[in-house]
Image (tube, rainbow, N blue to C red):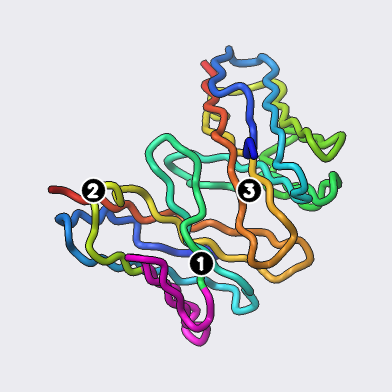
Amino acid sequence: RKEVEQDPGPFNVPEGATVAFNCTYSNSASQSFFWYRQDCRKEPKLLMSVYSSGNEDGRFTAQLNRASQYISLLIRDSKLSDSATYLCVVNLRGGYNKLIFGAGTRLAVHP
Amino acid sequence: DAGVIQSPRHEVTEMGQEVTLRCKPISGHNSLFWYRQTMMRGLELLIYFNNNVPIDDSGMPEDRFSAKMPNASFSTLKIQPSEPRDSAVYFCASRLPGLRDGYTFGSGTRLTVV
C-alpha cells in the first residue's frame, strides 16, 4: 500500500462548481499534513496546511480525520486559475520531518 | 527573499556523461531535500540533509547518484555516468525545522539524457 494515496483524476468541472479531493495515508503516526498545488511544468507550491480542527482559506477548506487517516480539500466557486494538480502531503513522525507526497489529483476547470 | 535557486534550468546530455545539478537553499532553512519527478513515479525523495549532514539517502537510485552539501548555502546532485532513464525533473527544496513548516521548492532542473 502506498504511504499516501490520491485519486489521480482528472476532475473536469465548470467554473463556479464545488469540487472535493480526498487523500488517505497509511502511517497512523503522521503528525502534520499539507496540500500543495503544482501547475504544469512548474514546481509544487504550498497551498495550505491541514489542522486537526479543519481550516479554511478563502474558497479552500481542508479537513483531517485522524481516525480514518483521511484528508480532504474542498474548493468552492472554482476558477479557471484553479486548474492544476493538487498534491496531498504527509509528514512522517521522526526527528527530521520527512514529507511524503501523493501522486496528485489533476483538476481542470472549464468555462 | 530569492527563494530556492537551482541551476541549470535545463540540461541535455549524452548517455555516459557526468551531470551536476546545483541548489542554493533559502537562507536560514536548515533542511534540504532533493526530489525527482517523472510522469510514471511522481515525486520521489532522493536524499535529504539536515544542518548539512546527509540524513536519509535511501531514495538514491544507485551508486551513479551522489549528493553533497559542503555548506549551508549550497548543495549538488551528481549523476555519473548518466543514462536515458535518469531523464526527469529534479527539484531541490528547503525548509525550516518546525513541524508546521512546508517545503519551498526551487524551479527544478529538467534533465534529458539522450
The one of A91 and A6 positioned closer to us in this rendering? A91
Q: Residue at x 72, y 55 (%)?
A: B96
Q: Which residue is mark 2?
A: A80
| Residue contact at pointers 3 and 1, CB within 8 angstroms | no
Residue B63 in the image: above or below residue A65: above
Residue B111 in the image: above or below residue A36: above
Q: Chain of mark 1?
A: A
Residue B94: x percent and y percent? 68, 47
Residue B9: x percent and y percent? 55, 24
Separation (CA) of disc 2 from disc 1: 34 Å
**Residue A70 in magenta stretch:** yes
Tell me where the magenta segment starts and ends, as one range: A51-73
Mark nearest the camera among 2 and 3 is 2
| Three-letter residue code for mark 2 | Leu
Q: Mark 1 Cα within 10 Å, few/some/many (few <14, many 20+)?
A: few
Q: Indicate the secondary structure of the residue bearing disc 3.
A: strand
Q: Residue at x 49, y 83 (%)?
A: A53
Q: Chain of mark 3?
A: B
Q: Which residue is mark 1?
A: A1
**Residue A14 in magenta stretch:** no
Q: Residue at x 54, y 15 (%)?
A: B12
Q: Is residue A103 left or right of residue B49?
A: left
Separation (CA) of disc 3 from disc 1: 17 Å
| Three-letter residue code for mark 3 | Leu
Q: Which residue is mark 3?
A: B45
| Residue contact at pointers 2 and 1, CB within 8 angstroms | no
